[in-house]
Amino acid sequence: MTFRRLSPVLGGFAALTVIASAAINPAATASPPVGTGKVVGTAVLKVIGGGTATVTWKENGGAAHVEKDVALPWEHTIDVVEEANSEVRANGAGATGCTITMGDMLVSFKSEPNPVCEFAYWG
């Protein structure tokens, strides 16, 4: 079972906290994109560190994309759809953090091993 809670972060932005009661395989739980469908800009997903890691990212509530043994640091640009959750996560000894930026705003940041960053735009 998953519980979702929205918290205001910055004007127009919300952080989506997901609390899962069991380990879930991201590829097995892919769902179609959600939100209004209105593209409001772009965001840059980044994983910080050195060496390699497995990076999993989701764009606008869509299916999980898994990239194995990618060189760090890693980054990818996505379109941002209003009211849809996007995320990036990394697993690997070299993965030390992640960020998501939209324009010049830092909208998600984690500095920890195997980081997970999430973001949703609510305009």
Image: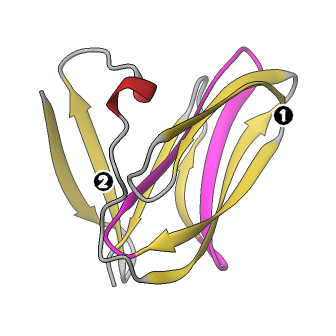
Q: Position of residue 105 (x, y in %)?
A: 59, 75
Callout 1, which amino acid? Leu
Q: Using the image, determine if residue 118 lies above or below residue 34.
A: above
Return the residue at label 1.
72
Q: Earlier in the sequence, mark 1 or mark 2?
A: 2
Q: Residue furthest front?
A: 32
Return the residue at label 2.
16
Q: Secondary structure at mark 1?
A: loop
The residue at 31%/62% (across/down) is 34
Point out the image quarter for the N terminus.
top left
Q: Using the image, determine if residue 113 lies above or below residue 88.
A: above
Point out the image quarter for the C terminus.
bottom left
Q: Position of residue 67 (x, y in %)?
A: 70, 30
| Quadrant of the rendered image containing residue 85 | bottom left
Left/right of residue 98 with respect to residue 116 in the rendered view: right
Q: Position of residue 32 (x, y in %)?
A: 34, 51
The residue at 56%/42% (across/down) is 57
Callout 2, which amino acid? Leu
| Quadrant of the rendered image containing residue 78 | bottom right
Q: Is residue 106 magenta?
A: no
Q: Which residues are magenta?
A: 82-105
Q: Secondary structure at mark 2?
A: strand
Q: Is residue 101 magenta?
A: yes
The residue at 36%/82% (across/down) is 12
The residue at 26%/40% (across/down) is 18
